[in-house]
Amino acid sequence: MLFLVKMDVAIPYDLDPAERTRLLAEEKARARQLQRDGVWVHLWRVAGQYANYSVLDVASPDELHEVLWSLPLFPFMTIEVTALARHPSAI
Amino acid sequence: MLFLVKMDVAIPYDLDPAERTRLLAEEKARARQLQRDGVWVHLWRVAGQYANYSVLDVASPDELHEVLWSLPLFPFMTIEVTALARHPSAI
Amino acid sequence: MLFLVKMDVAIPYDLDPAERTRLLAEEKARARQLQRDGVWVHLWRVAGQYANYSVLDVASPDELHEVLWSLPLFPFMTIEVTALARHPSAI
Amino acid sequence: MLFLVKMDVAIPYDLDPAERTRLLAEEKARARQLQRDGVWVHLWRVAGQYANYSVLDVASPDELHEVLWSLPLFPFMTIEVTALARHPSAI
Amino acid sequence: MLFLVKMDVAIPYDLDPAERTRLLAEEKARARQLQRDGVWVHLWRVAGQYANYSVLDVASPDELHEVLWSLPLFPFMTIEVTALARHPSAI
Amino acid sequence: MLFLVKMDVAIPYDLDPAERTRLLAEEKARARQLQRDGVWVHLWRVAGQYANYSVLDVASPDELHEVLWSLPLFPFMTIEVTALARHPSAI
Amino acid sequence: MLFLVKMDVAIPYDLDPAERTRLLAEEKARARQLQRDGVWVHLWRVAGQYANYSVLDVASPDELHEVLWSLPLFPFMTIEVTALARHPSAI
Amino acid sequence: MLFLVKMDVAIPYDLDPAERTRLLAEEKARARQLQRDGVWVHLWRVAGQYANYSVLDVASPDELHEVLWSLPLFPFMTIEVTALARHPSAI
Amino acid sequence: MLFLVKMDVAIPYDLDPAERTRLLAEEKARARQLQRDGVWVHLWRVAGQYANYSVLDVASPDELHEVLWSLPLFPFMTIEVTALARHPSAI
Amino acid sequence: MLFLVKMDVAIPYDLDPAERTRLLAEEKARARQLQRDGVWVHLWRVAGQYANYSVLDVASPDELHEVLWSLPLFPFMTIEVTALARHPSAI
């Protein structure tokens, strides 16, 4: 099932630079793995913001939460989730 | 899977009274059937408002949407949906 | 280029039923044609709401506006547009 | 009587890690005890957020406040309370 | 137990004048009876608005809802409820 | 004249503990004195929040401001003021 | 004492034109009388809106409410009131 | 001096079609004249909305208000005004 | 021309006390000079808040911005500006 | 294609002054270069705020994002983007 997820990122400006670098590398690796796994099926940057809109394909809200909670940047993100259903006009 | 649903009801004051009576009876019958079916697992009135907080147990967001869309009062409701996951401290 | 579009639909309850039926049929036909044309690339129902999240692939904001403005239900929709860019972690 | 409670947690990222670990363990123990006591009757994670929706069964708003105020994470939570009443369609 | 209640009144301007007069008289009578009964313990007008802040003393959220739901102007009011607890500095 | 005042308290978590203890003791003493003086006529805790709703009886907005501004916790409070008038249905 | 008042006006577009003309004339006459009486001490149009910011000098919130409630356009206005106090830097 | 103006248009769906046609033609003529006069210096459609962002060059807020107030669609528009100043990095 | 300006002040609680004292003294001196100059024509405290509503009389938005930007407390203020026009009912 | 961009700047007050000076100089140089390049076609200060409204002319949302993301002050800005289309009444 699909969920639309908006993630706004706000990393404190005084975070240790090495820690920041490490977090960003881990986040990118994790995002790519989840895409290869067919879980993170769309990932778009919001133009002009440190934010993304994503679509995740998961088996349940439990799996959705596990995936998001385990993201390295989760502690610095504000996340909104929208459950998606099939649209009767979709082909 | 569980979804928390808030439904705010706003029936136009000039709706035909017979139509209103019919809608309310149908809504009540439908809500009770869905409870007996184990789909509408919690139904609470928000004190002081023509609104409810409910928990629905469905197989997917598609089923959730079908259930809500088919409610007789759906055209007069503002609905917010929150996907729920298991809490690690829940027993 | 891609735009995420949220469309909330609110058709007045006292709209002439024949007019409503005609509008909905035209909207569905138009939405399907735009999908076949490769313009309306994603169309998801927001679970529990008379609303959709869509992704449109257009050549410019001018084309985006023309597409949305010409939808039969446009006069009854509240629309939000988000410009999407490529995400550096997308594969 | 029942109250729906939403708790959003925001622990400062620079809180001492040992203090954080201690707080989380105490919070979990307290949440479990309150569940065993029949006070915290529902506890759900909001999918994708460090937040929960809960239903508490208490004798009064005074007891509700005591329970919430004494949670170890209370200083780091934003809490919203909704008083619930019996719904006429509930079975 | 005490609840702070804000009631905003918005009567449609085209409501039948006789119906309006009847509703207002009934609302005033009901409000006065509830004050005499010790249920509606404070009733203040919000300066400059067709609104009031009230404090109600009831046995439960169920009773609070019954009282508010049965007000003649309930269909034309937007109501917010806040559960109140004893303050440790109150004398 | 009466003013409804909502005070939300947010003391920084890293405030010196001795300073915090001193502030809280001074706030409580000041709140009690103002109650004995007949100025702070109602003081209720908002259930589940570090916040209160209060009613103050003062001679003018100037006096209201002096009272609130001089509260020891004023620098850590977000305050909303509502001017109250006599309600025509109050007895 | 002074209150800053924002009044937003929204007259239904289908109001009887004669009624509208009468209301506007009465509102203007009333506003001018209140200015001559020294009650409505400032009256500014918000540029680009059917709205005004005003300062009223009254003896109490009760008088403020009576003045505003009795305005001919009151039923079509959304009003916000801010109690003003003397500023320590004012000369 | 320059003001950024956002105009959201919401014409009631049941407005007389001839009246609507007349209003739209007058609005277009007026907008074009104001552009030729050098008052309405920018006029952009918000993609996906019945709304525009405009920049007006006027001698004062009084002139700005007169221009906007006299627009044929003014009664059906929600307008926000932002006063613009020269930016120190502008060339 | 007149602008209504709301200034909310939020000085960090851990600002150096000597710096705070210096800033406040400079702000007061500047506010008084601008009042004597006929620029800052009204200055009112919002009762219960570290905030003011002010009316400034300037030659342009450029001058308005220069005046506000150069206030010693500007970095710690949230400012909202409303352009004011002459009201047709003002005398 | 054109995008309206609002940028609100909030530099932490405890940022190293030399770093602040460097950032501001780089931001100004970058903004001027982008104007000379015909990308940043309008740049206005919002009167009374550390904010600007800008219009950028870019080939795509991707280019818009690259331009904004690479601004030296990007980490300290809150940015809102609005896609603009040609207005049918524009001349």
Image (spheres, coloured by chain):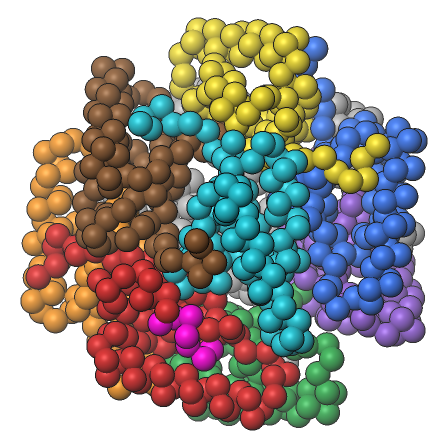
Chain colours: A green, B orange, D red, E brown, F cyan, G yellow, I blue, J purple
User: Which range of residues does the magenta coloring cover?
Assistant: D67-73
In this picture, residue B60 sits left or right of residue A83: left
Q: Compared to G34, does F47 lie above or below?
A: below
How far from the left and from the top, in percent, is residue A85? 31, 67
Instruction: Identify the residue at horizontal 11%, vertical 65% (top origin).
Output: B35
The front one of J47 and B59 is J47
Name the residue rendered at 25%, 67% in the picture: D58
Q: Residue at x 61, y 29 (%)?
A: G3
Picture coordinates of residue F39, whole percent (x, y): 53, 41
Q: Is residue J91 left or right of residue A79?
A: right
Report which quarter residue E78 is drawn in: top left
Which residue occupies 53% across, 43% down? F37
Q: Is residue J44 visible?
A: no
- Locate residue E63 relative to residue J9 in the image: left or right: left
| Place of residue J35 in the rendered image (x, y in percent of width and height, measured from the top left) | 86, 57
| Frontmost residue, A59 versus E90 | E90
Please name whichever residue, F79 or D14, is drawn nearer the observer in this view of the structure. F79
The answer to whether residue F30 is left or right of residue D72 is: right
Which quarter of the rendering shows the C terminus of chain J?
A: top right
Q: How many numbered discs?
A: 0
Q: Position of residue I12 (x, y in %)?
A: 73, 63
Residue I28, above or below A65: above
Residue B64 is inside the magenta segment: no
* Residue I55 in sight here: yes
